[in-house]
Image (cartoon, helix red, strand yellow):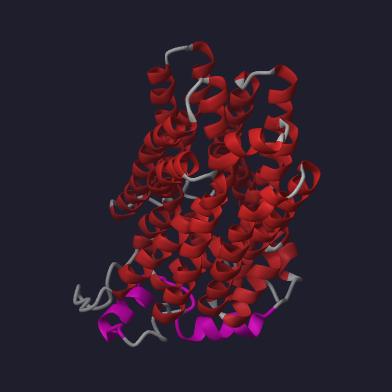
C-alpha cells in the first residue's frame, strides 16, 4: 500500500490539525486525571470512611460499568451530531459529577459507599463518548502516515495526566484534604468545556483556519469524514445491523481481545497502583503521588515513541500490519516485567521495574491507531465505541478482581501476576488472531 504524504507537493501552508491534536491531548489529560482522583485519594478516603478493600474495588469499578454501557449510544451520538457538541457536554457533565464526589464525607459509611459508587458511575457515563470521539477526530484530521503518531499522542495523555496531576492531587490530599481533590479537578473541567466549544471543529471542511493545501494533504493521505464521508456517516445513523458485521470479523475480535488486556494494565495503574505503593511498599500518600509520576513519565515516553516508530516503519515501506504490530508486541512483552516486583524489596528497584513496565505499556498502546486504520468510513464513531466497549470491560473486572485478591491474600503478589498475564494474552491475540490489519468494508 503506497501512502501519499502530501497531495500538494509538500505545500501544506497551515498546520491546523496539530492545534486540534493539542486540544485532544489537553482534554484527555483531564479525562484520565478525573478517573484517577479516587485512586490518589483512596488511601486516606478509605481509612477515614472505613471502606474495605473489596468495597474500594467496587467503587473503582463503578466508572467502567457505565463507561462500557454508554459506548454504543455515545458512538451513535458522535456519528449523528458530531464530536464538537457531544464532547463539550461530555466534559461539562463528567466535571460536575467529579465535583460532587467531594461531598460524600457528609454521609455515614454505607451511604458514602453508595454515593461514591453512584457518582463514579455517572462520571463514567458522561465520559463514554470521549475516546470514540478522539479516534473519530484523528481519523478525520490526519492522513494514514501521521495517524499512528497522532493516536499515540492523545493516548499518551493518560500517562501525562499522572505525571502532572498525581503530585498535585497528592499534595492537595496532604495539605487540604481528600475532598478538595474532587472540587479542584471538577472546576478545571467546567472551564475546559467552554474552551473546547469555542475552539474545536468536527472536520477540516468546517474549520475556517485550514488552507486548501492542508485540506488536500489530509484527504489525499486517507483521512476519513472529510466532505462526502461526513455526510455518509450521518446518513448511516444508528444502523445497529452493522454491529453483526463488526462482531463477526476475526481481525476486529482479535483487536478487541487485545484491548481488553491492555486496559487491564491501564486500570491497575489508574486505581490500585497508588494503594499498592502505600500499603505494600510503605510509602506515604504524598510520596506515592510523587513516585507514581516516575513510571508515568516512562509510559508517556513509550506512548509517543510507539506512534513515532509505527509511522516511521510505514514511511520505510512496511505494511500497516507490520508497522502497528511491532511496537505493540514489544511493548506488551516489556510490560510483563512488573511481575518481578514480587521478588524484590528495595523501593527504588520496584519503581524502576514499574517504570519499565509502564514504558512497555505505552509503547504497545496503539489500539486507537488500529481502529483508525480499520473502521468503516460510514460508522467510525460506532466502530470506535465497540472497540472501547471491549477494552473498558477491564475497568470493571480489574479493580474488583484485585480487591478480592488483596483482601484474601493480604498481598499484591497475585495481583501483579494477574495483570502481567494479560500482557501475554495481548501479544498472543495480535500474533495469532488479528492477522492482516486493513479497513473493514460494510455490506449493505
Residue 253: percent from the left, percent from the top? 66, 50
Residue 89 quadrant: bottom right
Position of 391 with respect to 241 (left or right) is: left
Residue located 64% across and 75% down the image: 77
Residue at the location (51% across, 20% down)?
281
Q: Residue at x 35, y 61 (%)?
A: 145
Q: Residue pushed farthest right?
A: 110
Q: Is residue 236 magenta?
A: yes
| Residue 356 % position (x, y) | 40, 29
Residue 140 appears in view: yes
Magenta span contains residue 159? no
259 vs 186, nearest the viewer: 186
Residue 357 locus on image (x, y percent):
45, 30
Q: Nearer the viewer, residue 194 or 430?
A: 194
Q: Indicate left or right for 385 with 339 as reference.
A: right
Count the marks.
Answer: 0
Q: Is residue 1 above or below residue 335?
A: below
Highlighted range, magenta: 209-237
Residue 310 rendering spot, x and y as whole percentages: 37, 49
Most common SS among magenta residues: helix
Q: Residue 423 occupies which quadrant of the picture?
A: top right
Q: Nearer the viewer, residue 387 or 202?
A: 202
Residue 377 visible here? no
Closer to the camera in the image, 203 or 229: 203
Quadrant where the image shows the N terminus: bottom left
Residue at the location (58% across, 75% down)? 86
Quarter of the rendering occupied by the C terminus: bottom right
Q: Does residue 81 lie above or below 369 as drawn?
A: below
Amino acid at each position: 500500500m503506497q501512502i501519499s504524504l502530501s497531495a500538494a507537493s509538500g505545500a501544506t501552508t497551515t498546520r491546523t490539525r496539530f492545534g486540534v491534536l493539542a486540544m485532544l491531548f489537553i482534554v484527555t489529560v483531564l479525562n484520565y486525571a478525573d478517573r484517577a482522583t479516587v485512586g490518589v485519594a483512596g488511601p486516606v478516603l478509605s481509612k477515614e470512611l472505613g471502606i474495605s478493600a473489596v468495597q474500594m474495588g467496587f467503587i473503582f469499578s463503578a466508572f467502567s460499568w457505565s463507561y462500557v454501557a454508554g459506548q454504543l449510544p455515545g458512538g451513535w451520538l458522535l456519528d449523528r451530531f458530531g464530536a464538537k457538541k457531544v464532547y463539550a457536554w461530555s466534559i461539562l457533565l463528567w466535571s460536575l459529577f467529579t465535583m460532587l464526589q467531594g461531598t460524600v464525607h457528609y454521609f455515614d459509611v454505607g451511604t458514602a459507599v453508595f454515593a461514591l459508587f453512584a457518582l463514579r458511575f455517572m462520571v463514567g457515563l458522561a465520559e463514554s463518548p470521549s475516546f470514540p470521539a478522539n479516534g473519530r477526530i484523528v481519523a478525520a484530521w490526519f492522513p494514514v502516515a501521521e495517524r499512528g503518531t497522532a493516536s499515540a499522542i492523545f493516548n499518551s495523555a493518560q500517562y501525562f495526566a499522572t505525571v502532572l496531576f498525581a503530585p498535585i492531587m497528592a499534595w492537595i490530599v496532604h495539605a487540604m484534604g481528600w475532598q478538595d481533590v474532587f472540587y479542584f479537578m471538577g472546576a478545571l473541567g467546567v472551564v475546559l468545556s467552554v474552551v473546547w466549544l469555542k475552539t474545536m471543529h468536527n472536520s477540516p471542511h468546517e474549520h475556517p483556519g485550514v488552507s486548501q493545501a492542508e485540506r488536500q494533504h489530509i484527504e489525499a493521505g486517507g483521512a476519513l469524514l472529510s466532505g462526502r464521508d461526513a455526510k455518509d456517516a450521518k446518513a448511516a445513523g444508528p444502523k445497529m445491523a452493522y454491529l453483526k458485521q463488526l462482531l463477526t470479523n476475526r481481525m476486529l475480535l482479535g483487536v478487541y481481545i487485545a484491548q481488553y488486556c491492555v486496559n487491564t494494565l491501564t486500570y491497575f495503574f489508574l486505581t490500585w497502583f497508588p494503594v499498592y505503593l502505600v500499603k505494600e511498599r510503605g510509602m506515604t500518600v504524598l510520596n506515592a503521588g510523587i513516585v507514581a509520576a516516575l513510571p508515568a513519565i516512562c509510559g508517556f515516553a513509550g506512548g509517543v515513541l510507539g506512534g513515532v516508530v509505527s509511522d516511521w516503519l510505514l514511511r520505510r515501506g512496511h505494511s500497516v500490519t507490520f508497522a502497528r504490530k511491532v511496537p505493540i508486541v514489544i511493548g506488551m512483552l516489556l510490560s510483563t516485567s512488573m511481575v518481578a516486583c514480587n521478588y524484590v524489596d528495595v523501593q527504588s528497584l520496584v519503581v524502576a521495574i514499574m517504570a519499565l513496565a509502564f514504558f512497555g505499556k505505552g509503547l504497545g498502546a496503539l489500539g486507537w491507531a488500529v481502529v483508525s486504520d480499520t473502521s468503516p468510513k460510514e460508522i467510525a464513531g460506532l466502530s470506535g465505541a465497540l472497540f472501547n466497549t471491549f477494552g473498558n470491560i477491564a475497568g470493571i473486572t480489574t479493580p474488583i478482581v484485585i480487591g478480592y485478591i488483596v483482601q484474601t491474600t493480604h498481598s499484591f503478589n497475585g495481583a501483579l501476576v494477574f495483570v502481567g498475564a494479560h500482557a501475554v494474552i495481548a501479544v498472543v491475540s495480535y500474533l495469532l488472531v488479528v492477522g492482516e490489519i486493513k479497513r473493514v468494508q460494510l455490506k449493505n
